[in-house]
Image: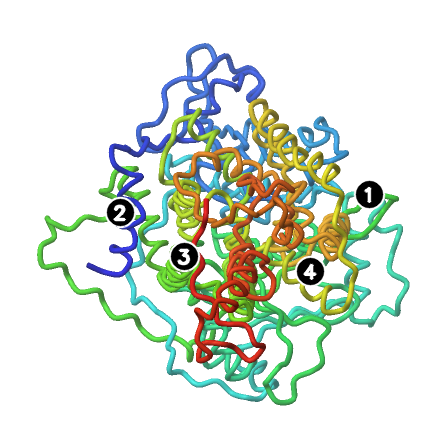
Amino acid sequence: MTIRSFLVTIFLAATLLGAQPAAAQSVLSTLLPDVNATDLVEGADGFGETSPDLPAVEVLKEGERIGWAFVTSDFVSTTGYSGKPIHTMVAVNDAATVIGVELVKHSEPIVLIGIPDSKMRAVVANYRGLDLVAEAESGGTAHELDIISGATVTIMVIDDSIVRAGLKVARQLGLGGLVEKAAPTGPQYELDPDAPASGDWQTLEGDGTLRRLSLDVNQINSAFAAMDDPRAGRRALTEAPETTFIEMQTALVSHPAIARSLLGQAEAENLETWLEEGDHAITVFGRGLYSFKGSGYVRGGIFDRIVLIQDDVSVRFRDRMHKRVNTIAAENAPAFNEADVFKIPADSGFDPTEPFRVQLLVQREVGAIEKVFTTFDLGYDLPEKYQRRAAAAPAPEAPAAVTTLTTLTEPQAHQALWQRIWETKTTEIIVVVGMLVLLTGVFFFQSLATRNERVFFWFRMSFLTVVLVYLGWYANAQLSVVNLIALFNSLTAGFSWQAFLLDPLTFILWFAVAAALLFWGRGAYCGWLCPFGALQELTNRIGRALHIPQWTLPWGLHERLWPVKYMIFLGLFGVSLVSVERAEYLAEVEPFKTAIILNFMRAWPFVAYAAALLIAGLFVERFFCRYLCPLGAALAIPARLRMFDWLKRYHECGNPCQTCAHQCPVQAIHPTGEINPNECVNCLHCQVLYQSKTQCPVVIKKLRRREKVGTIPDSVRDLTGHPNNPKPQPTN
């Protein structure tokens, strides 16, 4: 049994018993009942039969088929700012011409704030008449892009989805004479990892390893002046015509030798670690007046000015697919304003041995909030010296017994997908499982773990640092109330394990949280495994070291602020019953995406909000956890179901002793001595005090009594004159 199989068995055995994966449904079958054929295609009066070969339905007029309708997200997975597909229904006729388009469903609330729905629908409607045959011949650039200012990425995603999905449908149905691409019959090529590359920049340019796009101010002014929109030429750049507007160069750095030449040995090794099996990467260098990165990726995580295109393949880069290049290793390299590496995912269909292009979007302001756009292409064709003929695949010994992707059912294909993802995440899974095992051991043997106050303090700080840096910033395994909303929505709309199994670390953490709720309550996650909680505690410790004053709220006020987070959670849950998308938008009350997922690379209001919470946490430890966190509230509700009470207390706790209550980092201990499990984060500080020979009055009193009657020999006395404390026993 492989490591992956063993781990999957352990984590799924309890939850998958009796559960059957739901049959996969096309988006078309889900959204079709909400679409009126007449609204989609002028003159149409209904829909007919669905194609047996693909999710496309006949569009009928007086009983005759006049075209085929489909939803783009059934064929392409391009996502917008929200990270989710934009569902657009498209109808094409037998000549492969678009005869109808309707924006059916999307999750772009942040991008579309202030943009009228009518304006969006008008832009989408302009795709009627799009000639897919011409798009196939031009590589998807035969039409002019009509972009709305403020929704650049959304429009570009819609455009990309309509063109690529339309071409796939037209080819599969044979519309307009288009046919599916035949499997190549000639020799196949692959990257030759042993091929060398020059270490000199000019040589790399000369042999085609580096390719360049250079545009000056005169070319840009001419391009905008030639546009149909007369406003484009009225705000020409005033710099000298020969001034460099942008010089952009690119190279395929998933080839090891090219990566070493341009990035250096150390960065090439880091790149190899960053890329997973099947991934590729390009590096893009830029200088001049114009930035190829822009600021869209800061606001919404997408680089809206560049896109990689190869035939029907289109790759739009997100912030997680990006790494900055700090130094260029090649000799005689010019100085660049920007240098970055972009990952091309393995499932994109990209072939590094085939020509591709990086398309640059250039914008010009023509009004207070209006812009016009045009595009330029930087073509790239990997030189033959970096390629070799691929070895022919060996013939299977028993062809009849081989199962291929084309013979798999939908549930089998989905299962194969998540299993493949788990295999690629084996290292991360092992690390997370190891952290969970270690934390479980600490909880089970908490008396031993908390015996030495100093050792336990540094263990906790080290563990929280690993949680923040590795689990949070590296692996992005930050749980969110959005996960719970999605779970509830799936339970009401047809539950399937497949969607949850696609993110192994999140699945494992939720499994661990579910188990921990029965044993220890919500504190196991909130106090130890939440990256943002770790960030709050670590920054508070830094603040204490800098002598920032710590505020302890009066108990009455503190007790009345507790319910706020429950109100927030119930509000989000209520909104989700009406609109899941709106609830996910409002869930930005959690700063997790800003502080952990995007590393504060976001629009300033989100950064300011997250920073304000962290600043508040410098004065009131874990301010957000105590009063605002909807996830903590959601986990606290079932915390009362825990089966064990692990935290030891004395009869004197609370009456009269208030030491633990005063030192509890989150004020989860009532003045009467009881620990509120809904608010406790299981930091175990009270258990440190429970055994303290210098702070706990009960322990000190017992030791003095024993010392007075001479029951403790001198050999066990410590340097301060107090006897070493045998393990105290609880009196309750």
Q: Is residue 676 visible?
A: yes
Q: Nearer the viewer, mark 1 or mark 3?
A: 3
Pointer 2 with pointer 1, Cβ within 8 A:
no
- The numbered dot on residue 370 is 1
Tell me the residue at 43%/62% (across/down).
727
Q: Which x, y percent locates residue 232? A: 82, 49
Select label 2 or label 1 by which is in front.
2
Residue 395, percent from left and from top: 15, 61
Quote the CA–CA distance across marks 2 and 1. Answer: 47 Å
Residues tagged 1 and 4 counted as in contact (Cβ below 8 A): no
Q: Residue furthest front?
A: 709
Residue at label 4?
540
The residue beneath circle 2 is 405
Residue 337: quadrant of the picture: bottom right
Residue that numbered label 3 is attached to: 436
Closest to the camera, between mark 2 and mark 3, is 3
Q: Are marks 2 and 3 in contact (CB under 8 Å)?
A: no
Residue 24, compared with residue 542, is above or below; it is above
Numbered circles on residues, count: 4
Secondary structure beneath label 3: helix
From the top left corner, tell me how far across and down residue 463 is, in percent. Answer: 51, 64
Identity of the amino acid at label 3?
Answer: Leu
Label 4: how many Cα within 10 Å (few below 14, some 14–19, many 20+) = many
Q: Is residue 613 left or right of residue 571?
A: right
Image point (26%, 41%), residue name = 412
Q: Is residue 275 left or right of residue 290?
A: left
Mark 1 closeness class: few <14, some 14–19, many ≥20 residues within 10 Å: few
Q: Quadrant of residue 362?
A: bottom right
Tell me if I can see residue 474 in this picture.
no
Q: Tell me which numbered mark, 2 or 3, is placed earlier along the sequence.
A: 2
Q: Earlier in the sequence, mark 2 or mark 1?
A: 1
